[in-house]
Image (spheres, grey):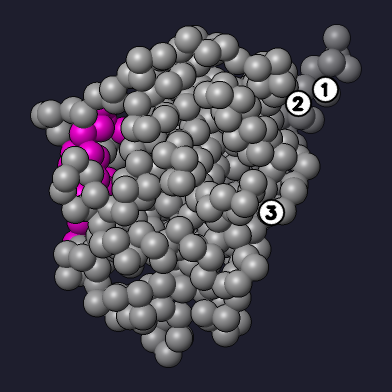
Amino acid sequence: MKVLKSIVKWLIGIIAVVVILAYMFDYDYILKGVRVVYFTGHSSAFIDDYPYFENDTIYKGTETDVWPLDPDYNKATLTNRLIDTNSEFGTVAYMIIKNDSIYYEWYAEGYSKGSKTNSFSMAKSITSSLMAKAVMDGYIKGLDQPISDFIPQYEGAKTTVGDLASMASGLDWVEHYTSPFSITARANYDDDLAEVILNQEVVNEPGQEFEYLSGSTQLLGMVIQEATGKSLASYLSESFWQPMGASQNALWQLDDKENRLAKAFCCISSNARDFARFGKLYKDNGVWDGKRILDSSYVAKATTSRFEGEPYGYGFWISDYMDKHIFAMRGILGQYVITIPEDNLIVVRLGHHRSTNVVNSFPEDFYIYIDEAYKMIE
């Protein structure tokens, strides 16, 4: 018994020392990560983590735009391959929108059409859309405007607003998802996100090549906030959520209840039907219900590779799978809004995991969700 008590005391002492050192050397964000992830029974970020963070509300309007149902709504059945893929990667929502009507939707694990789950990096597409809207509204002059006009700390840097949106910022950022000491982990759990980002320097020539960095989109969000004088959630609500008739209020994770800076690179919690609205908006060249929300020339630019041979435009991933022009919103755990304009088709998938096998810059399951959607609508 004495030995057990001695071991417990040593463990408590070690934990106390670790906590003290974490605070001394500014690694206390790791403690939050441990509390949010491991103490909730998870091993990584998870899709319904929003209750563990501060959030800003993205308000829907008084009038919602309900997706029409296809005459053959849910008459199709999931293919065997899709059933296996959904089971393997923990799909909680799968939806096919054909000719602007919901042809098929399926939910699992108690999730439903109203369930909120984390967008993760699909939020990058939305943040870039806010940038384009800020240009339309006159808050930003254009994609070539230097970010130093909004963030004085970058005085002298050549990085433009468009460079941030197209992942060509030149920032000193290492995109790493497994190390708790990475800048990506710090950005997700630190209580002062602005300080984290503003410590990043421009070390490479911007506007020259594609390099996927979450810090680029976070800095873009800060530029938008400075330019508009509005929170990202508020600007998103008035610019898109309400005009597109979103069915529910959504949530955007913040760094802290005092700083209240939105995580522009990730973490909008909403449902499959409302995420899909962005696929339709871009498919329809920026028009929703007869009203122009985004400039058509920007939509074309956003959904086309900026750098030849690279899979990214401005906030959207680009693929030529099946010799079709496909663009997609994409999150780290297999969150997808996949849009195929030539066939008037949108495929949405939300879930817990994605394939670790990468084919032509996309997780292998990305192609499965497309392939099986085509089989289901035949």
Q: Secondary structure at mark 3?
A: loop
* Residue where numbered disc 3 is placed: 361
Image coords of residue 115 (percent x, y): 40, 20
Task: Give the camera-side residue of 151 and 24.
Answer: 151
Around disc 1, counting alpha carbons within 10 Å, would you say few (fewer than 14), some (14 to 19), or many (20 or more)? Answer: few
| Residue at (28, 53) in percent of width and height | 286
* Closer mark to the observer between disc 1 and disc 3: 3
In three-dimensional space, the C-alpha distance between marks 1 and 3, rounded to whole angstroms, equals: 53 Å
| Residue at (34, 65) in percent of width and height | 298
User: Range of the magenta residues?
Assistant: 229-252
Residue extending farthest to the front is 378
Image coords of residue 266 (percent x, y): 47, 46
Task: Give the camera-side residue of 165 and 262.
Answer: 165
Image coords of residue 377 (percent x, y): 52, 24
Which of the numbered marks, if any, corresponds to residue 6?
Answer: 1
* In this picture, residue 317 sits left or right of residue 151: right
Residue 52 makes an appearance in the image: no
Which amino acid lies under the numbered mark 3 shown in the image of this protein?
Answer: Ser
Which amino acid lies under the numbered mark 1 shown in the image of this protein?
Answer: Ser
Viewport quadrant of the N terminus = top right
- Pointers 1 and 2 in contact (C-beta within 8 Å): yes
Around disc 2, counting alpha carbons within 10 Å, would you say few (fewer than 14), some (14 to 19), or many (20 or more)? Answer: few
249 within the magenta span: yes
Residue extending farthest to the bottom is 156
* Residue where numbered disc 2 is placed: 9
* In this picture, residue 6 sits left or right of residue 171: right
* Closer mark to the observer between disc 2 and disc 3: 3
Q: Secondary structure at mark 1?
A: helix
In three-dimensional space, the C-alpha distance between marks 2 and 3, rounded to whole angstroms, equals: 50 Å
**N-terminal-most mark, 2 or 3:** 2
Which amino acid lies under the numbered mark 2 shown in the image of this protein?
Answer: Lys
